[in-house]
């Protein structure tokens, strides 16, 4: 399928996409650095785990409500600006903690509530804005691809900066917080006077009325199944690298190659979407991920270079997973004429994204433990870990691919 040539408003796309950088920079410390950092400051693992579980579940459950509320704010910029202000305060608190043992738990709880609220509202509002801006279906993949590429670059900066800025974790995170606020302010300034396309929702619209949209339900089911397939390897990655490959020192190279390949490959998926359509392009991405990743089922100790190749190949496929599903969602919203409810659509979308991560951790970790895998024990059932890390995700992704192919005609733009 060759789509007609439509001029891409490059300045508008750039101004829109920059806001993805600080959001990605915030996400990585929240999920990677904070648990270990606050444990080192004196919080028990039990209380820390319980707090993170409760707040992350609450964060996921509130996303649909935030999407509904974002639709009722005056402009997309106003919701992004409000979210950015709350996120900046929360991140400054989170990365510059009070050191009183009594106050530390409450400090972490309060700062995480602010961070989760600001991050979720910003992500939903920014994603909804990106669905409303394109004036032609062929441009939607370009907006989402640009946004996700900038986000991946933000992840790379967030991964590197704390260690580069200081020798200790605390000092590095504190210095990182100031850089984060500066990047957030600059990207918010880029959004200023960006074209608004949001409509005022009708008074009778309800949050869950978006689920009456069959096309959205089909897309959401495929997105959820594919998302779980991606979340399981993300949960088990470090265990596989350390205990199966014996390559703990290579963790940074694996992660950087994966995310960098994803960012570099974004133009490829935009081109494929324009030439063959978003559904076909996404199907190609899923198939590439399965073909590349199933190879890792044969890996063992010392297979560093082959796994690096797998990281690059699956990173390329990551570009399809990040850029094309939101573009297909924007198509579904436009086809239904439901632009006034864009925030509600993306609120439910964000809930499913976070539920995937929670479900993957809740199923994969207990399963491999039950099957006999023990962290750091080379005599434990490493085969169970390998199968859970490689074969299970590939099976789920093939199921998602089957659903996508079955409903391809319904999802076409």
Image (spheres, rainbow, N blue to C red):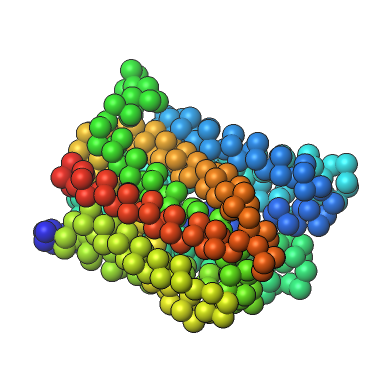
Depth check: give the residue in front, 273 or 129.
273
In the image, residue 281 lies at what x, y percent?
24, 59
Rendered position, 32 above or below 82:
below
* Count of numbered circles on the image: 0
Instruction: Name the foreground residue: 316 vs 364.
Output: 364
In the image, residue 298 lies at what x, y percent? 46, 71
> Which residue is located at x 77 percent, y 62 percent?
170
Name the side, left or right, on which 413 lies relative to 30.
Answer: left
Q: Is residue 348 left or right of residue 47?
A: left
Residue at x 61% of width, y 61% of height: 381
**Residue 352 visible in the picture:** yes
Q: Quadrant of residue 224?
A: top left
| Residue 198 percent coordinates (x, y) | 33, 37
Decide which of 318, 330 is in the foreground and name it. Answer: 318
Residue at image point 25% right, 37% down: 215
Q: Please name the residue shown 52% across and 48% down the image.
A: 360
Residue 333 visible? The answer is no
């Amino acid at each position: 399928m060759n789509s007609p040539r439509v001029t891409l408003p490059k300045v508008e796309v750039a101004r829109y996409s920059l806001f993805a950088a600080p959001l990605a920079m915030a996400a990585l410390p929240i999920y990677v650095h904070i648990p270990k950092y606050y444990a080192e400051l004196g919080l028990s693992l039990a209380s820390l785990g319980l707090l993170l579980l409760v707040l992350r579940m609450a964060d996921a459950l509130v996303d649909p409500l935030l999407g509904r509320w974002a639709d009722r704010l005056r402009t997309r910029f106003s919701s992004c600006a409000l979210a950015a202000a709350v996120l900046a305060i929360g991140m400054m608190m989170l990365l510059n903690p009070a050191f009183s043992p009594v106050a530390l738990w409450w400090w972490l709880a309060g700062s995480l509530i602010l961070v989760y609220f600001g991050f979720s509202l910003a992500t939903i509002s920014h994603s909804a804005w990106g669905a409303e801006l394109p004036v032609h279906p062929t441009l939607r993949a370009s907006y989402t691809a640009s946004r996700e590429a900038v986000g991946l670059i933000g992840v790379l900066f967030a991964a590197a900066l704390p260690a580069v800025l200081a020798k200790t974790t605390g000092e590095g995170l504190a210095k990182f917080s100031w850089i984060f606020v500066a990047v957030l302010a600059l990207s918010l300034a880029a959004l200023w006077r960006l074209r608004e396309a949001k409509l005022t929702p009708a008074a009778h619209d309800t949050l869950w009325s978006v689920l009456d949209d069959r096309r959205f339900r089909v897309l959401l089911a495929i997105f959820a199944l594919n998302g779980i397939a991606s979340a399981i390897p993300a949960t088990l990655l470090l265990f596989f690298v350390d205990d199966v490959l014996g390559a703990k020192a290579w963790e940074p190279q694996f992660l950087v190659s994966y995310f960098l390949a994803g960012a570099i490959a974004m133009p490829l998926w935009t081109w494929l979407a324009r030439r063959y359509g978003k559904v076909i392009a996404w199907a190609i991405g899923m198939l590439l991920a399965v073909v590349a990743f199933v190879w890792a089922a044969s890996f063992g100790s010392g297979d560093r270079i082959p796994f690096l190749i797998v990281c690059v190949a699956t990173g390329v496929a990551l570009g399809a997973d990040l850029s094309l599903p939101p573009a297909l969602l924007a198509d579904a919203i436009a086809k239904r004429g439901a632009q006034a409810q864009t925030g509600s659509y993306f609120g439910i979308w964000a809930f499913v994204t976070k539920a995937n991560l929670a479900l993957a951790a809740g199923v994969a970790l207990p399963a491999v433990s039950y099957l006999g895998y023990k962290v750091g024990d080379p005599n434990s059932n490493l085969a169970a870990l390998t199968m859970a890390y490689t074969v299970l995700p590939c099976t789920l992704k093939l199921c998602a691919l089957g659903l996508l192919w079955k409903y391809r005609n319904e999802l076409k733009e």
